[in-house]
Image (cartoon, coloured by chain):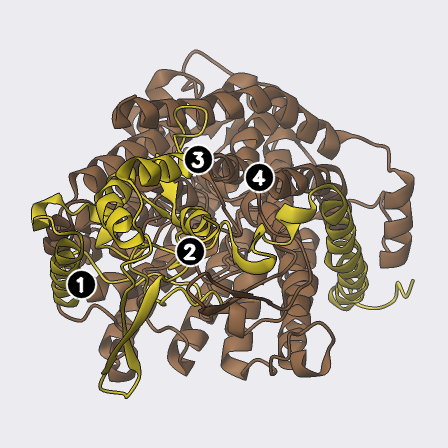
Chain colours: A brown, B yellow
Amino acid sequence: MSDTAAGLLQVGALIVLLAVCYRPLGGYMARVYTGEKHSRVERGAYKLFGVDAKAEQTWAVYARSVVAFSAVSVILLYLLQRLQHALPLSNGLPGVESGLAFNTAASFVSNTNWQSYVPEVTMGHLVQFAGLAVQNFLSAAVGVVVAIAVIRGFARSKTDRLGNFWVDLTRTVIRVLLPICILGGLLLVAMGVVQNFSSGHEVTSVVGQAQTLPGGPVASQEVIKELGTNGGGYYNANSAHPFENPNPLSDLFEIFLLLLIPVCLTRTFGVMVKDKRQGYAILGVMGTIWGAFVFLATLFETQGAGTATRAAGAAMEGKETRFGEWASSLFAVSTTGTSTGAVNAMHDSFTPLGGGVPLFHMMLGEVTPGGTGTGLYGILVLAVLTVFVAGLMVGRTPEYLKKKITGREMKLVSLYILATPTVVLVGASLAMGLATARASILNTDSPHGFSEVLYAFTSAGNNNGSAFAGISANIPFYNTALGLVMLLGRFVPIVIVLALAGSFAQQQPVPVTQGTLPTHKALFVTMLVGVVIIVTGLTYFPALTLGPLAEGL
Amino acid sequence: MASNLPGSVRQFGVAIRALLVFTVALGILYPLAMTGVAQGLFHGNANGSIVQVNGKDVASDLIGQAYTMDSGKKDDKGDPIMVADPKWFQTRPSAIDYDAMGSSGSNLGPNNPDLLAAVQERKKAVAALEGVSESQVPPDAVTASGSGLDPDISPAYAALQVNRIARERNLSVQQVQQLVKESTEGRTLGFLGEPRVNVVKLNNALAAL
């Protein structure tokens, strides 16, 4: 079979797998968040937490719960790392230095999973499975429940209540994430991923050289790393590491996992707003852009531009033999479109334009299809903007899902859209202005060095976590700056979008008339694709011309 | 519940309790249960697919190794310079010399002059070792993998090494080709990933002869 035919079949198989799960999982999640009954385990949990499961919250209380829970999470994760040396199962590693511990805590709580460290020699098993993996579950769940609250904002009317954060969070963990992780984690072990508590297995090769093989409960963490669009590798090489991703089948399964919830949430959205076509339209936008980026990345990687790449004969630097260019490009686009940031190949060594594709994909704001929950609420904000722009063109009061878009909503939408680019671009400019920060660049000889810095801040601000990993980010400046960018890039948009949901929930629905723009048809899908690319993409165009475009053209 | 406390303070109390409950459930019970089941059902996989030759643990089937020997020369730092051991099939270049406790790629960019120089040097070395022209050296032979622990090479690079191995070990070319065939995997299900030869399996088979 030719490379192209096999590569296309690989993409096709992924789409079929997702299509099979779309209705069952999407519909199941809708029932999870609309059901009245609490299971016995859940009732026990609410008693332990000290919450009244029947009491629904206003947007402000919901937002305060998100922020309080995340703040406490940052503190606990920070302390776990600092005190590592005094805790069991730490592989004899010392406590983590304060700047790095802050950065890592911010990173995992914000669902970014940016890693300034080499896990094998920094984080013992305990910090990984009792700290980092717990946040892999919880930060993913936080993203999902915020999206659910936003959906309720559209689905409900004349109420100031958006649901109960603690109930939504608990249900996400118990009814959605955990069952998939148990099944998926065991499947990963069956495919060859390790799951043990060994602190290192000594072997002596047939030529007499010693090698220590790392251990760890990897599969149980790997599965939530992908499913929760987290992306933080148990090992430094992430999903390029054979113990995390041993073969092409596990690779396809991991890509499937990281797309699963963001894709199926569009169905949940359609069911909850009682118009499934709206979900298909949103999915259509996500799929169109994702597909275009897969095409571009694969094209650039198989062409193999770059002086070193040409000398080698193909773009195999930083890629694994078992994956090659096709599976590496598919992974790169899916991981940067979902705010995951796991990698099965090193993006820093991608061809100039091939590496620009994942960078630009993150800049779109992680909405194609985006992180767990974050992708859905992100694209709904852009849908509101699209309806507004269309309304301006024809001179009508714009409305989306029977809700009027007034000055108040548009102010919130504008703030939302400006928040992430602001922290990304201010951060990147600051880094380029400081000599100590510039000294961290690995590829200093070309615009590629600027791309490393831009990639780092784009990844942090959009909570992706992948890197042009040549950059030496474990210095006080980057640990602090990127840590702050991750927290701002996560929680400022969450508060704004919850305020927006609160505002919609209070409205009375307006009747659909002949003049209403249908938001489930091809015209709207096309316009929304345009808005995603133009509004968010062009914000970064000047920065892109200095990096990948300057290098690749 | 202390309902007279201001709302934000109360949320922090709930947050702490919830986080502790989730940490016990997801951070302790979940990984322990998963490890228990995985060790029971898939013992070999869960422990890293360790393989033995003559009763000794020599490798993991999944993790590449360096098949090199001391050249007798030292580098600037005084460390011995390792060169390819001609008696063994060679794995890909590695940014970390196959040190499994620090997986990493080189992260060098596609136009990086150091990478260009390294590729050209490796090409020359592989061509000399195998007695072929530089144009015959496949890309995976001169590029470092993403993990630095890639156990696989392309079938083209394996084929290039067959004659040398046969010569060095006094084996027939057919015998060596047969061994290569046994360590070769096509695309999974016919279309996933790339065809490849697992060098660790291959060299362990050579050692067991």
Callout 3: 10 Å neighbours few (<14), some, many (20+)? many
Outermost residue on the front side: it is B170
Q: Residue at the spot x=40%, y=80% of the render?
A: A475
Under circle 3, the secondary element is helix
Q: Residue at the spot x=39%, y=30% of the render?
A: B187
Q: Quadrant of residue A442?
A: bottom left
Judging by the rendered image, the residue that carries numbered circle 4 is A191
- Amino acid beneath label 1: Leu
Is there a contact, CB below 8 Å, between mark 3 and mark 4?
no
Q: Is residue B115 left or right of residue B8?
A: left
* A253 in relation to B147, above or below: above
Q: Is residue A318 visible?
A: no
The numbered mark at residue B115 is: 1
How far from the left and from the top, in percent, is residue A286?
41, 31
Considering only order in the chain, which callout, 4 or 3, is on the residue closer to the N terminus?
A: 4
- Amino acid beneath label 3: Val
Nearer mark to the viewer, of 2 and 1:
2
Judging by the rendered image, the residue that carries numbered circle 3 is A384
How far is disc 3 from disc 4 in space, using C-alphas? 43 Å
Judging by the rendered image, the residue that carries numbered circle 2 is B64
How far from the left and from the top, in percent, is residue A232?
51, 57
The numbered mark at residue A69 is: none
How far is disc 2 from disc 1 in space, using C-alphas? 21 Å
Under circle 4, the secondary element is helix
How far from the left and from the top, in percent, is residue B129?
17, 57
- Amino acid beneath label 2: Gly
Is there a contact, CB below 8 Å, between mark 2 and mark 1?
no
Along the viewing direction, whichever of A476 and A534 lies nearer the viewer? A476
Is there a contact, CB below 8 Å, between mark 2 and mark 3?
no
